[in-house]
Amino acid sequence: MSASQPLDLLLTREIKVIFGRWCGIYFIKKYGAAMRKTLFLVGVFLVLVLVGCSFRESSDKNKTAIDFTVAAKDSIPDEIVKTIDGKKSEEFAMSFTVDGYTYIAVGYGEQATGGYSIRVDEMYETDSSVGIHTTLVGPAAGEAVNKMATYPYIVVKIEATDKNVNFE
């Protein structure tokens, strides 16, 4: 050790050398097989995730737009109206099949004022499901609105189906 090098700097360099050798050589010799196995399993997992995502994309490509009707409140079966009334204070998404039709209901919970509406952005069918994408539309800036709480929801009606409904 030269007089110009402080003792702590020398110790730091020696610790780095010892630690580097221990991690680099000793670790690979002792844990190399386990590390290779772990890396292999991580690689297999990543491949499975990527393959799963590609299957999801391919099923989305088979979307077919379907016809639907926004159901007026007086045309919705009473049991559905009662269920909606019980859930309308919170967000909800549900479907019912009654009398040859599937009713799909989406609600956005309590809103502080009036002036809200719900837009159906997309309604589609795939081989295994029916999908619906809706958006809550708020009142326009400066629009006069009712100051009472409201509970916006929409019910759409399609031909009866036993497919799962995906709410987006």
Image (cartoon, rainbow, N blue to C red):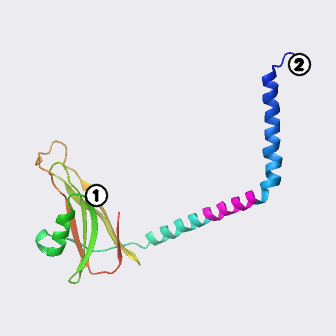
The image position of residue 40, as x and y in percent, is: 70, 62
Position of residue 75 measured from the top left corner of the image (x, y, whole percent): 13, 74
Q: Which mark is residue 2?
A: 2
Q: Residues within 10 Å of mark 1 (few under 14, many from 20)?
A: some
Q: Taking 28 as reference, is 59 above or below it?
A: below
| Magenta span | 34-46
Instruction: Tell me the residue at 80%/30% (across/down).
Output: 13
Q: Identify the image quadrant of residue 136.
A: bottom left
Quote the CA–CA distance across marks 1 and 2: 74 Å
- Number of other residues with Cα within 10 Å of mark 2, as a class: few under 14, some 14 to 19, many 20 or more: few
Q: Amino acid at mark 1?
A: Thr
Which residue is rendered at x = 89% and y = 19% of the image? 2
Picture layout, residue 113 above or below residue 166: above
Q: Residue 122's spot in the image, x, y percent?
A: 32, 65
Residue under numbered circle 1? 135
The furthest residue to the bottom? 100
Q: Amino acid at mark 2?
A: Ser
Quarter holding the N terminus is top right
- Residue 15 at what x, y percent from top left? 79, 34
